[in-house]
Image (cartoon, rainbow, N blue to C red):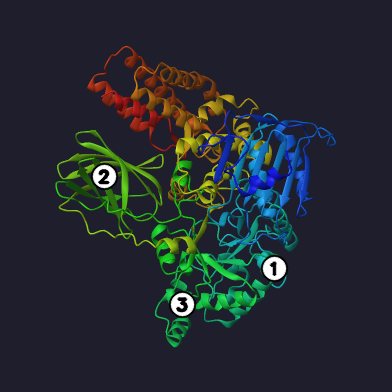
């Protein structure tokens, strides 16, 4: 290539020496999808001669090179040989040398050009080069990669994953692997939740009683934490530590009862939930403790941000203390929120003294706090919208909770910028509206109350929903399943909701599907649409300046080191894409195709263990290395989504540290790819009954499940941990058979009688119930097929 071309390419992509086409989002196996992808007309590829001849100019990335070569070797299966004279060149040119510790405003932009002659990666900084390398590695398949020019930079600067290693301790090696995943997803923050009611994991030099008395021996030494920081730094990942104050403090209370708002004595918390122990904001010793501790934390973690938690404060200890009540009176603090804000102001000053900025959950948001704080929202778009509107900065985590099992598409739709109604809730002349109130009982907590309104409009139905205390949102895909039965879809903080409701006069009954779980409900007609709360949206500048990104969160009540990758990967890539890619990259079908590609890539290239963990636990459950029958059976199932599994354990009195995480539900992927594929085939067949390919694919899959049952049943019988699934196997067989009968009937153009249809619905309704924390996901596509019969 002539010397001037790279420069020309870098400055002006329009006058390329060959015809290029902008690749539509999703045509290459990349995730997150880059900002701009161009391929030469007619395609073409570069076949690699390994190992690559890597040259780096502009910064020192020596330490990264062997790692990149190793990953390329893993991806291509090539042997570890010296670089040859004919090796494919990879020239990495870094424009500006920066400190090796990544910062919140680090420039991560890069430009990757794969031409017939070799590869060039131009980056603003070392961090851009690291992001570009991940893109490059994703492109390598069968020792070749497509000719392509990619210009890329993230939409949001803050893209992280929070891991809770307090509730279940995660070994250092486990965390390093997740950091590899964070970097591979071109994310840049590892938010490390280090303390909680069930354990204090930060080893303190000044207060060794913390780890000695309040960690069950499971803590990170300062050397180990420095090692994690160094490991992350070399991958361009910031580490933000979280030390939770003043609540989530049961473990702290065991070690240092003298700092608490009530005298104790305290015990290690073994249950999961929200507990009473709180630091005493009226005690000066508390601030001295925090000052010393923050000094230690700041020595280990160089990041400018320090997370102080601040969530879920149960104020009873404060309210019950005469001394604290008197303190509040003296300071003119009218309630527990004002007291927490007072405490946070003091903590914020301590952080400032240690050159750290304060970050916390929604509960730290208060007008008395300076605008320099950062709020991580787990309370959702109403809270985040208000934060941004008042010119505080925030990041979004609601909807990105990966421990709350949800389909990847739900997380994918979770836009950071709060969405408005666009006047969709205004009922116009000539439009008829019906409003229904409902109560939605859950397994834990109060029933949810709310109402929804469906509007019969000229262009079709539209509607909105009002959950008590929350702003109104539009629903989508309102469909009448019969003259009296309807459904719609709407995303909520609990996941995607899909009610199936039957109207009888002024009453409705049926169920709300939350994810894949049905929750029975009843409701009644409202005489008119309710008042509702209109979401208050920040303006464009506030959105841009104040919302910095988001974080996936992985709380570990029912996640331990044996299953962590199963819950995080590859689904965290979907969150990564929402935070990196352009706002309009939203095609779900395309996302799932690329997610499948990064699933295998992340196992092969990055070494993530989602498949290995599942396979190992299946061998344990099956008592055999032949796990194929269990795998096939598992494809028809999903773990009960939303927080259903947590709430079932709570109801059973098993929502504690002592609960083993040894069920099939613990290692089932959060959603079944085979079921989603089947669902797509069912859609194709319903749209066109003559689609023989779809019919054949459905038949093949159902036959496979049905024929597998006699093979899996002995496995289920031999292990008490699998025995609760024996009836599930019977139902999978029945439903597979039902699906095959429905296909036969469609092909022979035979209709079922009303009684037969009712019986089939009954069987599906029965099979839809959660059993041993598992849902037969196969129910849903077969139900769709059955409904299409009518
Ligand atoms: C939280 O989920 N309590 C931050």
Q: Is 618 left or right of 46, judged from the image as shown?
A: left
- For residue 490, say whether it is visible: yes
Determine the secondary structure under disc 3.
loop
Furthest residue toward top: 748
Q: Secondary structure at mark 1?
A: loop
Callout 2 secondary element: strand
Q: Residue 309 at what x, y percent from top left?
A: 54, 65
Mark 1 vs mark 2: give the one in front. Answer: 2
- State if disc 2 and disc 1 touch (CB < 8 Å): no
The crowd level at tag 3 (other Cα within 10 Å; few <14, some 14-19, many 20+) is few
Q: Which residue is mark 1?
A: 204
Residue 29 visible here: no
Give me the C-alpha separation between circle 3 and circle 2: 42 Å
Q: CA distance from mark 3 to mark 1?
A: 31 Å
Please state the horizontal and vertical placement of residue 302, each as a whole percent of the image: 68, 65
Q: Position of residue 278 (x, y in %)?
A: 52, 71
- For image coordinates 62% across by 55% down, the residue present is 190
Residue carrying label 3: 368
- Residue in view at x 56 percent, y 41 percent: 37
Q: Pointer 2: what residue? A: 462
């Amino acid at each position: 290539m002539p010397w001037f071309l790279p420069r020309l390419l870098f400055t002006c992509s329009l006058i390329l020496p060959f015809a290029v086409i902008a690749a539509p989002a999703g045509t290459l196996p990349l995730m997150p999808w880059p900002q701009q992808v161009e391929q030469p007309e007619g395609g073409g590829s570069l076949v690699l001669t390994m190992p690559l001849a890597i040259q780096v100019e502009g910064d020192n990335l020596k330490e990264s090179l062997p790692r990149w070569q190793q990953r390329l070797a893993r991806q291509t299966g090539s042997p570890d040989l010296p670089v040859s004279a004919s090796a494919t060149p990879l020239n990495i040119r870094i424009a500006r040398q920066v400190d090796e510790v990544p910062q919140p405003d680090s420039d991560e932009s890069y430009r990757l050009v794969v031409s017939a002659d070799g590869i060039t990666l131009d980056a603003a900084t070392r961090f851009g080069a690291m992001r570009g390398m991940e893109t490059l590695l994703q492109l390598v398949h069968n020792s070749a990669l497509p000719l392509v020019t990619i210009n890329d930079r993230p939409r949001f600067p803050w893209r992280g994953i929070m891991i809770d290693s307090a509730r279940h301790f995660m070994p250092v090696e486990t965390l390093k692997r997740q950091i590899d995943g964070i970097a591979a997803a071109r994310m840049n923050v590892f938010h490390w939740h280090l303390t909680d009611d069930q354990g204090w994991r930060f080893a303190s030099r000044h207060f060794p009683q913390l780890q000695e008395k309040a960690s069950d021996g499971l803590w990170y030494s300062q050397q180990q934490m420095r090692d994690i920081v160094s490991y992350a730094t070399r991958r361009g990942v910031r580490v933000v530590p979280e030390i939770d104050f003043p609540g989530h403090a049961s473990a702290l209370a065991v070690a240092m009862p003298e700092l608490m708002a009530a005298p104790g004595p305290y015990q290690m918390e073994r249950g999961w939930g929200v507990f009473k122990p709180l630091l005493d904001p009226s005690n000066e010793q508390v601030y001295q403790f925090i000052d010393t501790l923050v000094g230690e934390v700041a020595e280990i973690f160089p990041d400018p941000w320090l997370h102080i938690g601040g969530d879920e404060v149960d104020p009873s200890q404060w309210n019950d203390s005469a001394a604290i009540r008197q303190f509040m009176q003296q300071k003119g603090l009218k309630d527990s929120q004002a007291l927490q804000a007072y405490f946070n102001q003091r903590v914020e000053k301590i952080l400032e003294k240690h050159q750290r900025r304060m970050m916390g959950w929604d509960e730290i948001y208060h007008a008395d706090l300076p605008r320099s704080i950062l709020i991580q929202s787990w309370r959702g778009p109403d809270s985040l919208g208000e934060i941004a509107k008042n010119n505080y900065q925030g990041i979004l985590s609601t909807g990105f909770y990966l421990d709350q099992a949800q389909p990847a598409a739900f997380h994918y739709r979770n836009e950071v910028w709060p969405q408005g109604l666009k006047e969709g809730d205004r009922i116009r002349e000539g439009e008829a509206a019906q409003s229904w109130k409902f109560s939605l009982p859950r397994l834990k907590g109060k029933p949810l109350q709310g109402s929804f309104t469906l509007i019969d409009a000229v262009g079709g139905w539209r509607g909105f929903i009002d959950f008590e205390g929350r702003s109104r949102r539009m629903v989508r895909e309102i469909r009448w399943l019969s003259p009296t039965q309807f459904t719609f879809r709407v995303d909520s903080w609990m996941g995607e909701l899909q009610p199936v409701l039957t109207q009888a006069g002024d009453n409705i009954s049926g169920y709300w599907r939350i994810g894949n779980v049905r929750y029975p409900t009843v409701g009644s007609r409202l005489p008119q649409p309710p008042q509702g709360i209109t979401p208050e949206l920040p303006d464009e500048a506030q959105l841009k300046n104040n919302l910095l990104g988001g974080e996936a969160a992985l709380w570990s009540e029912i996640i331990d080191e044996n299953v962590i990758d199963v819950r995080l990967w590859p689904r965290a890539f979907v969150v990564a894409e929402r935070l990196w890619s352009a706002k309009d990259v939203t095609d779900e079908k395309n996302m799932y195709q690329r997610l499948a590609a990064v699933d295998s890539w992340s196992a092969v290239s990055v070494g993530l263990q989602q498949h290995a963990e599942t396979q190992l636990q299946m061998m344990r459950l099956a008592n055999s290395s032949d796990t194929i029958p269990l795998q096939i059976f598992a494809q028809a199932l999903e773990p009960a989504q939303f927080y259903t599994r947590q709430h079932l354990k709570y109801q059973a009195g098993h929502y504690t540290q002592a609960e083993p995480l040894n069920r099939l539900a613990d290692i089932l992927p959060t959603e079944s790819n085979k079921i989603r594929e089947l669902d797509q085939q069912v859609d194709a067949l319903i749209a066109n009954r003559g689609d023989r390919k779809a019919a054949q694919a459905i038949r093949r899959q159902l036959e496979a499940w049905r024929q597998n049952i006699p093979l899996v049943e002995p496995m289920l019988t031999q292990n008490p941990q699998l025995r609760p699934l024996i009836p599930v196997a019977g139902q999978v067989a029945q439903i597979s058979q039902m699906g095959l009968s429905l296909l036969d009937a469609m092909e022979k153009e035979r209709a079922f009688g009303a009684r037969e249809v009712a019986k089939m619905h009954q069987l599906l309704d029965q099979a839809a119930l959660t059993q041993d924390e598992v849902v037969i996901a196969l129910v849903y596509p077969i139900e769709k097929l059955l409904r299409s019969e009518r």
